[in-house]
Image (cartoon, coloured by chain):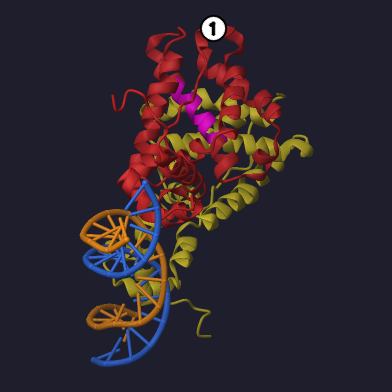
Chain colours: A red, B yellow, C orange, D blue
DNA sequence: GTCTATAATTCGATAGAC
DNA sequence: GTCTATCGAATTATAGAC
């Protein structure tokens, strides 16, 4: 029973510190500009430790970019408040966790990160939209439209930082964007 | 009068070939992964020529990322067809010129490219929206919302390439997205 | 105007002492 | 488990021959 009772190993703290620093650097600089050396310096450990724990830069990114949207069960949401619920949820999720910003920046230039983004879309967003009961033939398309607006909001607010989008209060964004998502989810073109 | 009668210099063809290759590489790989060596190889010239003509990698990008949205005069568009006009225009503009894809990819990781994106937004999109006559106090915000949807569409369709967004026909996209832009431009939240 | 040669960095990754 | 030392490759940029 060497593994059945997980004892907090000393290295766990180091692993966590590396992941935290990696998310920050990948979020701020993207995949190519974020260097293992810089990440290690932030985490106050030796660069070779990163390689030891995560094998390669790609392995480190894969671990750091693990992201759960934590979408609510859309079938339990009042049908006329789907858009509002989604925008509010996305905003809260992004502002509290920079992992998505890291994934978004990296996906622009790194093929592996882009593939991860597509998987996140298919496994989480498209799956949630498919589960609440509109015409199955159009759910993928509806989910894609929702992604185009929500990722565009994230891109302009957190990556490019367009001043008017950055300055809008979360509640103002909800007011403006919720009807868009509502129509993409339940409307006809 | 050594310059008043511009004679086609031999080097002009080389300059143009470099720019074309640079746009392709920047659009496909982003700023960091696109190398001067690869661009020079595409243009069938020596890498040192790129430095000679454009001074540095940043100077080359600045020249290659020059982009004119060529927005129509919104004051001349029927007020209830503003959204439709804009989506159609953006789609046509993007599919015919990869410069915006290059700018979009680079803006994710390169601070200079992001600044360029903000300038393009302020000087062209925000200016066009301000010129057609809604409440001046809200025009910047309306332009920001339009950017969030249009850049999100470009990001999901040309950069991350989410399958459902890639597969939608331009006319379907117009049908779905036009009402969104129409409301951002002329509606109340 | 074009190209060769190379300088000066910087990076990811490895080997091995302790 | 942690760190020192370093390898090998790739990059931007420069100096200078032709």
Image mark 1: chain:
A
Q: Is residue A149 covered in magenta?
A: yes
Tell me the magenta residue range: A143-153
Query: In the picture provided, is B14 more to the left or to the right than B101?
Result: left
Residue B166 visible at all = no
Q: Give how far across and how far down residue A50 sits, in percent.
A: 37, 49
- Residue for point 78% across, 38% down: B137
- Predominant SS of the magenta segment: helix
Q: Could you say where residue A174 lies in the image, as x and y percent from the top left?
A: 65, 25
From the viewer's perspective, tell me whether residue B61 is left or right of residue B37: right
Residue at x-position 37% and y-position 50%: A49
Number of numbered discs present? Answer: 1
**Residue A90 seen anywhere in this rendered image of the structure:** yes
Image quadrant in which you'd find residue C15: bottom left
Q: Could you tell me which secondary element the residue under label 1 belongs to?
A: helix
**Which residue is located at x 66 percent, y 29 percent?**
A173
Q: Quadrant of residue B187?
A: top right
Q: Quadrant of residue A161?
A: top right
Q: Which residue is mark 1?
A: A76
Q: Who's the residue at 39% across and 10% down the image?
A: A136
Of residues B81 and A152, the one nearer the viewer is: A152
A15 or B98, nearer to the observer: A15
Taking depth in this image into account, of B157 and A162 the one nearest to the observer is A162
Residue B156, above or below B107: above
Answer with left or right where residue A25 lies relative to residue B74: left
Where is residue B139? Give x, y as percent. 72, 38
Image spot of residue B101 (x, y percent): 43, 46
Side (left or right) of D15 relative to B126? left
From the image, which quarter does the C terminus of chain B lie in? Answer: top right
Q: Residues within 10 Å of mark 1 (few under 14, many from 20)?
A: few
């Amino acid at each position: 029973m060497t593994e059945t009772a997980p004892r907090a190993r000393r290295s766990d703290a180091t692993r966590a510190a590396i992941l935290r620093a990696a998310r920050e650097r990948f979020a701020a600089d993207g995949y190519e500009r974020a260097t293992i050396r810089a990440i290690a310096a932030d985490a106050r450990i030796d660069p070779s430790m990163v390689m030891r724990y995560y094998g390669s830069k790609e392995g480190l990114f894969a671990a750091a970019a693990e992201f759960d949207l934590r979408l609510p069960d859309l079938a339990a949401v009042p049908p006329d408040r789907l858009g509002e619920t989604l925008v509010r949820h996305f905003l809260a999720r992004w502002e509290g966790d920079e992992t998505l910003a890291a994934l978004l920046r990296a996906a622009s230039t790194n093929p592996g990160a882009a593939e991860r983004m597509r998987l996140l879309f298919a496994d989480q967003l498209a799956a949630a939209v498919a589960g609440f009961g509109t015409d199955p033939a159009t759910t993928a398309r509806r989910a894609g439209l929702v992604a185009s607006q929500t990722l565009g909001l994230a891109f302009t607010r957190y990556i490019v930082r367009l001043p008017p989008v950055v300055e809008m209060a979360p509640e103002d964004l909800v007011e403006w964007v919720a009807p868009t998502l509502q129509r993409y989810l339940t409307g006809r073109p």
